[in-house]
Amino acid sequence: MKDCIDSIRLQNHKDWELIAVNDHSTDVSKAIIESYRDSRINVLENEGSGILPALQTAEKHLEGAFVTRMDADDIMPQNKLTALLKILVQKTNGVIATGTVKYFSSNNVSEGYRRYERWLNETANKQLFYKRIYRECVVASPNWMMRRSDFDIMNGFSLLTYPEDYDMVFHWRKHGFKIESCNECTHYWREHEDRISRNSKIYQQESFFRLKLGYFLQEFKEKDINLLGTEKKGILLAKMLQEQKIPFRWFTNVLKLVGQKKHDIILENISTLPPTGVCISSIYPNKKQREDLECYLKITGYELGDNAHFF
């Protein structure tokens, strides 16, 4: 926590207020933050329990014209607030400012997290946020800034559900907010074994899939659904679709599985994919195979980020 607070106090931009919410801590974290003699730091007790109630507690005390959030484990690059503010002051309302991220750890950062880092940064640099929204959360939870007026339009954190960072991106899109990246690193993301995203059920794959599938079905409620892929993610999506009694066709690129049944659905050859409806691909293979799949989908009549999405 001390590294985090120090990085905020060392920001080039000095006009800020930190609303720090103590979530019923049993360690010395509250004493650490109260040891700072800085009038810009306001310490509150969480009115509920957990991250989302902590955010909702904090928003009741907002006074500034701009809003961001920060996680206690992480570190702000010295130019973070300046870089994000620069985007917002040059724009009218309806813009979310972000940048790139970098994982760090006292141990090695796993290749899985490195891949996510690369994907997030490519998404930011190419401004592909809403095109890729169903694949993963496209903005790191503590790596954004927005105008207070826009924050109030979307009712702040009050309507969010877990996983709240992913849900927030969908709320931005619902309100027509544009996400813009400054294309410089604005967040150092700490990786460690005790991270809540590693250990809490609300941040595991099934929670993310239930959230994004709900938004997907709202967006494409009048479309026929074609599901690609029969491994773990494909099976999870099939299960969720059946739970909601949503009809779908299920396609595989594994020839020996064609004609077999999974969850009472007959698997079809991907070569017979119809050129209509909307496509959910639970297949995310290596780059060459992914490019081939993208090419095939395009020839068949699907456009990634439009009527076809990787999950």
Image: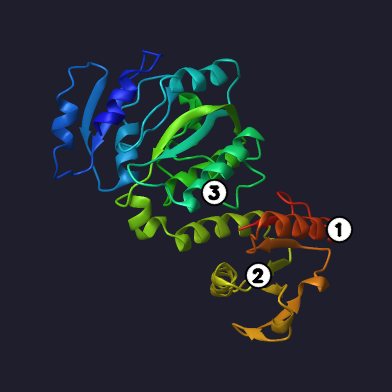
- On screen, residue 292 versus residue 181, left or right, reads right
Give how far across and how far down residue 278 sits, in percent. 73, 61
Quadrant where the image shows the C terminus: bottom right
Q: Is residue 272 above or below residue 89?
A: below
Q: Is residue 223 above or below residue 129?
A: below
Q: Amino acid at mark 3?
A: Arg
First of labels 2, 3 by sequence position:
3
Near mark 1 (Cα within 10 A), the count class, few <14, some 14-19 or many ≥20, is few
Q: CA distance from mark 2 to mark 3?
A: 21 Å
Q: Nearer the viewer, residue 219 or 112?
A: 112
Q: Nearer the viewer, residue 189 or 61?
A: 189
Q: Which residue is label 3 attached to?
A: 115
Give how far across and how far down residue 222 sits, in percent. 72, 61
Q: Which residue is label 2 attached to?
A: 229
Q: Which residue is label 1 attached to?
A: 299
Give how far across and how far down residue 95 sits, in percent. 58, 27
Q: Residue at x 37, y 18 (%)?
A: 11
Near mark 3 (Cα within 10 A), the count class, few <14, some 14-19 or many ≥20, is few
